[in-house]
Image (tube, grey):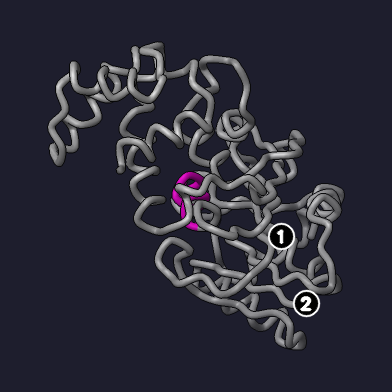
Amino acid sequence: MNYRDVQLALNRLNLKPKKHLGQNFLIDKNISRKIIATSEVSSEDIILEIGPGLGALTEQLVGKAQKIIAIEIDPKLSKYLSEKFSVYNKVEIINGDILEINLPKHSKVVSNIPYKITGPILEKVFFKQNPPSGVLTIEKSIGKRIFLSEAYKEFSRISVSLNAFMKPILKYNIPRKSFYPVPKIDLLLIKLIPNEDLHPFLSGNTSITFFLKFVAGIMPYKNKNLVNVLSFFFKANKQISYSKEKILQILKKNNYENKKLFTFTNKEIIELSSLFYS
């Protein structure tokens, strides 16, 4: 779809893009092709598309995938898509909130996801055993943090949690003008594949829940020494009372130095969560 196609469709639907739903419609066919090429979709893939909008990506996926499951929160757009793709048995349109529904079985995610709920979407779709692969257009500032580096500012909750489950392998800048309305943020196309070395601790729902809670609780203090970080975490949760002396004793027994949190590797943070979970 190009700019004219999008304008005609929106006028026909009497629909104005809703900012609170992150409705920015893809109008650059070259970018559509790049997203599809990066996705390397095969005839065996079941694709999950989050926020398909007017179907710019959907129409290119139809000829490549075994099935496309498109989840659209806007009822007008959902009805439009159902009519547009009604001749294809392989396209299923679901009107619903991606954060509220039970996800159907899928092998890949190909989406220009709503930017305001990037974190919750990543958690729901990828933070689990046997996650799908994904090609996503996301906010550039978030995308940069997903790729692990030694830069202190890029070390964040999302970089630690996502890299525990997924491996980011590609990133491309996407021009803002590829979308209508033009978003106010810079965009990045990223490609994720499942982490083949998933830590054994992340093998159950309960331990995964603790790990994500642990990361969320410690990352605001990434520039503090580990003992202080853990002390803050346990005080905030109030479930277990550990003195700083007790924490230090546990760390020394397990050969951890009391250094600043941001100097620890992703694997070490997972192992710390496992240690204090047990």
- For the residue pair 135 and 25, the one nearer the viewer reads as 135
Specify start and end residues of the magenta stretch as a single range: 117-124
Amino acid type assigned to the residue bearing label 2 in the image: Gln
Instruction: Give the quarter of the image for residue 87.
Output: bottom right
- Residue position marked by numbered label 1 in the rendering: 6
Q: Is residue 66 above or below residue 259?
A: below
Residue 120 sits inside the magenta stretch: yes
Q: Residue at x 77, y 36 (%)?
A: 172
- Residue position marked by numbered label 2 in the rendering: 66
Instruction: Give the quarter of the image for residue 52.
Output: bottom right
Camera-nearest label, 2 or 1: 2
Task: Provide residue 129's location: percent of width, then percent of height.
Answer: 54, 58
Q: Is the residue marked by circle 1 packed among few (<14), some (14-19), or many (20+) residues within 10 Å?
A: some
Q: Is residue 191 above or below residue 204?
A: above
Q: Earlier in the sequence, mark 2 or mark 1?
A: 1
Q: Residue at x 59, y 60 (%)?
A: 130
